[in-house]
């Protein structure tokens, strides 16, 4: 009978752990509370099923355990019962899938007024690029990477000259404005991951992936790499600061543009 | 054990395989080492798989110690940690679970449960094992070459798997890993052909498909899937080997590695991921379906009740097998592939939950109004149900594309697949070993040791992986050799990590107890007799225990009924063996 | 990956057709046999080895289809330059056709119990197929000499990889065929080599079809076909 007790402890204990544990998601800092809501729906449905099934097993083991002289019932199948169980399951699954697909549609539909921000991953460092006054990012190719052009930005593209380059530093974003993160990698697969934003996406060398979100509160957030990228993977950290609009503008003024960077690199070359 | 009542022998043409077709060993070497007898091959497969699995278990202890007490074992640096994680994952998924379920249980049970003398192509079956052993040796060789084994993670994603930033990437590690996989696949194909064709052609008279035990249905479907899915891993491995050794650019895009431009260019890392997961997702069911099948038989036998909804169970196995080929990209929701695919793959993934749920209901309903004997196999079956339901339900989080976005690549994923694909199938492995050990050895396992092992393993494994989900929900990423100082991770995470590690070490120690039980009971266990569980299926009706070469006496058994005639109203006993004709009320104890 | 899905859909049709004959909706618990009704024999009348070969060919088919899937996916990227096909490939194709035809002839002779013709047919098949393999090596050499080395371009890499993989399968077939041939030479009864002759024939026909598909792929005809399929679907 020990197993019956253990089954009940597992069912009840899991629920208690869920309710009492201090480990829960980080306070959200983006518009993706839809995702959190979908998780809550999923927790409810799956939680009820889990507790029901485990307690039912415990009951069966208790009630129908072997006693001398006892014989099991003979019941090959019960189509009506199976039909209803399948139907109820299908409804439960649909109740999770429908909101999931609905939110996914929002997740991949970038609003037109989103500002593009490029994140470049390399072993084991984050770099960022913001559009300059023209509001556009210039093109870039990994094959153009060189010591004075570490992100491989196309020097001939007029849109790239005023792009703002942040190498290894903090990325600042204005609160309340949609951003489209363009994700690029120079070497291996990385993944730009800020738990508070809920969104994440791999960056694949050779192509550009993206996701979008709206930062909803100011603060400083840690960036982690979420896709194994070699021995330095756990050390690949960065920082995103979400600012008020005024703070953001102040910060933006202090950053270096691509043409300034090329020029200063040229001066260093000339000085040598 | 005559199956045919005297007097009508001449009217019943026997399903006999002419003796000349059966291979006969001629020496000690061909009896025990280079044997073509499926039972010997099964034991060879099982022992090899369990041995290499034990290596992977030790690796997991080392990783857990590093996570809970960083730096406690000074030889574990990031490089070693990633090598351990890679070898642990690859060994457990492929070299232990796949090999044990199909090569071990498949080889032992298919001929016996179907009333055949052996597999249909015994020579290829033998080669299959030796190639598997070679694959294992090549894999283990990784530990002894310069640079050590690969540390690319078991998914081996390029480009990092063949670059210098990853352990073994520019050394021998990755080459040995890919070579080993290729050998494994060739070897498995030889074995798999046997399992499939034996089910098609080796069934004895009367063994229609709908009379087969669900164990056979599970192994059969899983093998068909494996035969079609492993080629994808083969293709991916060969192509990556070309990229690594010959400098091609199948998967290698233009790369600047540590400031150096590489020669490669234009390749697609995503292409590898598609090939890998085209194999990788069916692989989950390649492990799960045999477990589903076996556990159905354990529950039915030890609850003395027919499996509830047998037809539905068969359809669900076949349906899951077919569906599992169109869900692979749910491993790639956040991989940067075309996000529109998410709608399709989320839908197919959640649809697969319906047949899976039906299977769970039918197991539970088999217990209902049963006569439940709490034997070791039954305990493990209960353990399987709980962990599988738990792991299956968390799969609904990860399969539902948008919910996967925050949870992907966190410990939630690790907890999920360990629960559903690690703990749950291993529960079935233990249950199956306890169930068939008496047939293989003629002796029972020690009950007390077995119970201690069960309770520690079941409760311990649950305590390891259930709380781990919540670390993932918090956002703790997987594959971190150390968390370091991370702003959003509170100190309590460290405490939980220590708890999990201690549980892991306790559960690990319990496995040594299990191995001890296996060895001890071999000589000291209680004599089992031919059919200690009073089961209906054919492997319990053999004339000798353990079954002799050729399995059956002079004549093959003839099957008169399905595999689940337990507690039939009016029958003298609460089980009727499959080879007992209807209307023959004389209960026959099989000879032991 | 759509190519492999189409292939698997084809297999699924075959499997479904087979399962449809297995009474999967029967209620087995109601169908126990008595002592006097003889249970049915469940195995197929087709030789077990042939069924085994059929399953094996399905796996080989999946393998090559996966290579083709990868080929199409990689081809869509920018750095692809098609490889010029050496003209010797036409000759090789002819050789393989001769090999396949010779085996077909061998299969008919073994039924007619005509030992001498069988020997001739088997040797012809061996020679023609060996010629195919040597021709493939010449094709490789020609390409390498012309500067189309393996790592230069994905089209080159795929050409060497896939033709090499096909060649290995042919080599395996040659091993079996040469064993059969030597058994015939040693005077084995024709009834005993009939099955292996038939198995070789099936395998050769299959590998010929695979080669024709691959040839079409390398020549670029397959692309036109896929483009048409896409248009039809849209």
Image: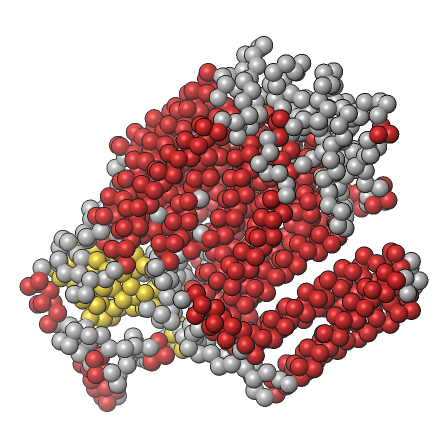
What residue is at 64 percent from the left and 52 percent from the top? B188
What residue is at 64 percent from the left and 33 percent from the top? B211
Q: Position of residue C75 (x, y in %)?
A: 47, 74
Where is residue B198, by image quadrant?
A: top right
B62 lies above or below C59: above
Quadrant location of the C terminus of chain B?
top right
Q: Position of residue B349 (x, y in %)?
A: 41, 48
Residue A60 seen in this snapshot: yes
Name the residue at the right extreme: C187
In the picture, measured across the screen, residue A123 lies left or right of residue B383, that is: left
Residue B133 seen in this snapshot: no
Q: Position of residue C220 (x, y in %)?
A: 53, 78
Instruction: Identify the coloring.
Output: secondary structure
Q: Nearer the viewer, residue A54 or C84?
A: C84
C34 lies above or below B277: above
Name the residue at the front extreme: C232
What residue is at 58 percent from the left and 75 percent from the top? C216
Name the residue at the left extreme: A246
Name the residue at the top extreme: A69
Q: Nearer the viewer, residue A105 or C158?
A: A105
Quadrant location of the N terminus of chain B?
top right
Q: Position of residue C48 (x, y in %)?
A: 75, 49
B518 lies above or below C215: above
Where is residue A241, by image quadrant?
A: bottom left
What residue is at 19 percent from the left and 65 percent from the top? A112
How many circles with numbers are drawn on the protein?
0
């Amino acid at each position: 009978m020990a197993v019956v007790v253990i089954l009940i402890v597992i069912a009840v204990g899991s629920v208690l752990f869920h309710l009492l544990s201090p480990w829960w998601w980080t306070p959200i800092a983006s518009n993706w509370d839809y995702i959190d809501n979908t998780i809550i729906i999923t927790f409810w449905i799956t939680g009820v099923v889990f507790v029901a099934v485990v307690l039912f097993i415990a009951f069966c083991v208790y009630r129908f355990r072997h006693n001398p002289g006892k014989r099991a019932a003979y019941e090959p199948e019960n189509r009506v019962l199976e039909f209803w169980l399948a139907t109820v399951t299908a409804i439960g699954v649909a109740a999770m899938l429908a909101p999931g697909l609905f939110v996914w549609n929002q997740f991949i539909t970038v609003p037109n007024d989103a500002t593009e921000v490029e994140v470049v991953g390399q072993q084991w460092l984050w770099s960022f690029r913001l559009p300059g006054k023209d509001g556009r990012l210039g093109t870039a190719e990994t094959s153009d990477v060189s010591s004075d052009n570490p992100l491989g930005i196309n020097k001939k593209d007029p849109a790239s000259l005023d792009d703002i380059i942040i190498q290894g530093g903090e990325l600042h974003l204005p609160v309340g404005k949609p951003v489209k993160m363009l994700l690029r990698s120079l070497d291996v697969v990385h993944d730009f991951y800020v738990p508070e934003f809920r969104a994440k996406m791999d960056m694949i060398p050779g192509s550009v992936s993206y996701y979008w979100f709206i930062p909803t509160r100011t603060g400083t957030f840690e960036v982690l790499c979420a896709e194994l990228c070699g021995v330095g993977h756990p050390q690949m950290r960065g920082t995103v600061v979400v600012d008020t609009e005024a703070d953001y503008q102040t910060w933006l003024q202090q950053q270096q543009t691509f043409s300034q960077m090329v020029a200063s690199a040229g001066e260093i070359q000339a000085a040598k | 054990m005559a199956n045919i009542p005297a007097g009508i022998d001449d009217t019943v043409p026997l399903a006999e395989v002419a003796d000349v077709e059966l291979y006969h060993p001629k020496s000690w070497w061909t009896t025990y080492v280079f044997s073509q007898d499926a039972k010997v091959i099964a034991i060879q497969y099982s022992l090899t798989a369990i041995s290499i699995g034990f290596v992977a278990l030790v690796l997991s202890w080392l990783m857990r110690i590093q996570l809970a007490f960083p730096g406690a074992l000074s030889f574990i640096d990031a490089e070693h940690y990633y090598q351990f994680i890679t070898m642990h994952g690859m060994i457990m998924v492929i070299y232990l679970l796949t090999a044990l379920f199909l090569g071990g249980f498949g080889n032992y049970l298919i001929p016996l449960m179907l009333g055949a003398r052996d597999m249909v192509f015994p020579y290829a079956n033998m080669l299959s094992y030796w190639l598997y052993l070679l694959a294992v040796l090549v894999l283990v060789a990784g530990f002894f070459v310069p640079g050590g084994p690969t540390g690319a993670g078991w998914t081996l994603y390029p480009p990092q798997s063949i670059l210098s930033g990853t352990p073994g990437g520019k050394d021998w590690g990755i080459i040995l890993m890919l070579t080993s996989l290729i050998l494994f696949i060739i070897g498995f194909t030889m074995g798999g052909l046997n399992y499939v064709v034996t089910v098609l052609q080796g069934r004895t008279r009367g063994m229609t498909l709908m009379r087969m035990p669900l164990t056979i249905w599970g192994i059969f479907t899983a093998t068909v899937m494996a035969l079609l899915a492993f080629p994808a891993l083969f293709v991916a491995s060969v192509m990556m080997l070309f990229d690594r050794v010959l400098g091609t650019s199948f998967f290698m895009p233009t790369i600047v590695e540590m400031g150096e431009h590489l020669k490669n260019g234009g390749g697609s890392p995503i292409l590898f991921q598609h090939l890998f997961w085209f194999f990788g997702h069916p692989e989950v069911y390649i492990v799960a379906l045999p477990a589903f099948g076996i556990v159905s038989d354990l529950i039915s036998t030890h609850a003395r009740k027919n499996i509830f909804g047998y037809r539905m169970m068969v359809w669900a196995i076949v349906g899951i097998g077919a569906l599992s080929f169109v869900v692979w990209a749910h491993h790639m929701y956040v991989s940067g592939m075309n996000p529109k695919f998410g709608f399709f793959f989320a839908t197919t993934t959640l649809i697969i939950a319906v047949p899976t749920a039906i299977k769970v209901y039918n197991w539970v309903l088999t217990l209902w109004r049963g006569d439940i004997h709490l034997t070791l196999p039954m305990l493990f079956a209960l353990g399987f149900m709980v962990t599988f339901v738990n792991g299956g339900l968390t799969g609904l989080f990860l399969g539902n594309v948008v919910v996967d976005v925050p949870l992907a690549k966190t410990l939630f994923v690790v907890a999920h697949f360990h629960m559903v694909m690690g703990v749950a199938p291993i529960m079935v492995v233990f249950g199956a070993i306890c169930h068939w050990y008496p047939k293989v050895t003629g002796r029972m396992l020690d009950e007390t040791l077995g119970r201690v092992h069960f309770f520690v393993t079941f409760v311990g494994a649950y305590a390891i992986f259930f709380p781990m989900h919540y670390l993932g929900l918090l956002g703790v990423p997987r594959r971190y050799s150390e968390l370091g100082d991370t702003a959003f991770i509170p100190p309590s995470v460290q405490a939980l990590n220590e708890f999990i590690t201690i549980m892991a070490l306790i559960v690990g120690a319990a496995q040594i107890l299990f191995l001890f039980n296996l060895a001890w009971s071999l000589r000291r266990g209680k004599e089992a007799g031919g059919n200690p569980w009073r089961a209906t299926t054919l492997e319990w009706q053999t004339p000798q225990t353990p079954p002799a070469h050729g399995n059956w006496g002079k004549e093959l058994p003839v099957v008169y009924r399905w595999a689940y005639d337990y507690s039939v109203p009016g029958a003298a006993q609460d089980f009727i063996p499959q080879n007992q004709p209807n209307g023959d009320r004389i209960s026959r104890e099989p000879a032991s | 990956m759509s190519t492999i899905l189409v292939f698997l859909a084809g297999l699924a049709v075959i499997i479904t057709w087979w399962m449809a004959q297995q009474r999967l909706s029967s209620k087995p618990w109601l169908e126990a046999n008595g002592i006097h009704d003889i249970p049915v024999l469940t195995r197929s009348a087709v030789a077990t080895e042939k069924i085994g070969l059929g399953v094996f060919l399905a796996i080989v088919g999946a393998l090559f289809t996966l290579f083709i899937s990868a080929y199409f996916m990689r081809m869509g990227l920018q750095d692809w330059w098609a490889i010029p096909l050496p003209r010797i490939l036409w000759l090789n194709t002819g050789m393989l056709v001769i090999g396949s035809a010779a085996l077909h002839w061998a299969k008919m002779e073994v039924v007619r119990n005509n030992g001498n013709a069988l020997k001739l047919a088997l040797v012809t098949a061996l020679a023609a197929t060996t010629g195919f393999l040597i021709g493939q090596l010449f094709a490789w050499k020609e390409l390498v000499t012309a500067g189309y080395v393996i790592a230069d371009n994905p089209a080159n890499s795929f050409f060497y990889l896939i033709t090499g993989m096909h060649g290995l399968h042919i080599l395996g077939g040659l091993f079996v065929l040469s064993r059969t041939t030597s058994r015939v030479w040693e005077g084995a009864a024709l009834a005993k080599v009939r099955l292996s002759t038939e198995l070789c024939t099936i395998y050769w026909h299959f590998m010929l079809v695979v080669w024709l598909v691959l040839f079409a792929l390398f020549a670029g005809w397959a692309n036109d076909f896929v483009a048409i399929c896409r248009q039809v679907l849209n």
